[in-house]
Image: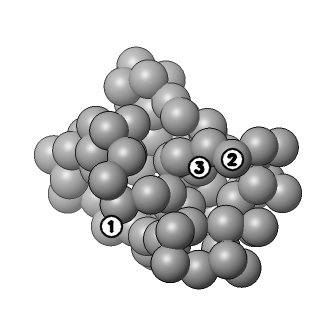
Amino acid sequence: MALTIYGKPECTDWARSRSLLDSHGLGYDFKDIIASEGDAQTAQAISGGPSSPVIVFTDGSFLVEPSDESLTEALSHHGMI
């Protein structure tokens, strides 16, 4: 997967980002930070706080609770769309 997503399944920010990713047919590995304490700790170490979603690209760059515009820009920058 080109993206790893750390998030809460019921999070509205994640729902919005998921919709955008799905609309472009992009795959991702979703890590549920509610179900897994380890994934929650990893997400917090990356983002610096308890955020959802944390979207991590293969080059290690990441976005925290991105707007649709910033997520689209990052996907374009990474050649994914």
* Residue 52 placement, left or right of 75: right
Residue 71, placed above or below residue 5: above
Q: How is the image coloured?
A: one colour
- Amino acid carrying label 1: it is Gly
How packed mark 3 is, by other alpha carbons closer than 10 Å (few <14, some 14-19, many 20 or more), is many
* Residue 81 placement, left or right of 1: left
Q: CA distance from mark 1 to mark 3?
A: 15 Å
Answer with mark 2 or mark 1, whichever residue precedes in sequence.
1
- Of helix, strand and loop, which one carries label 2? loop
- Mark 3, residue position: 54
How packed mark 1 is, by other alpha carbons closer than 10 Å (few <14, some 14-19, many 20 or more), is few
- Of helix, strand and loop, which one carries label 1? loop
How packed mark 2 is, by other alpha carbons closer than 10 Å (few <14, some 14-19, many 20 or more), is some
- Mark 1, residue position: 27
Residue nearest the observer in this picture, 8 or 47:
8
Q: Which mark is residue 50?
A: 2
Pointers 2 and 1 in contact (C-beta within 8 Å)? no
Q: Residue at x 67, y 66 (%)?
A: 40
For residue 44, which quarter of the picture?
A: bottom right
* Residue 51 placement, left or right of 73: right
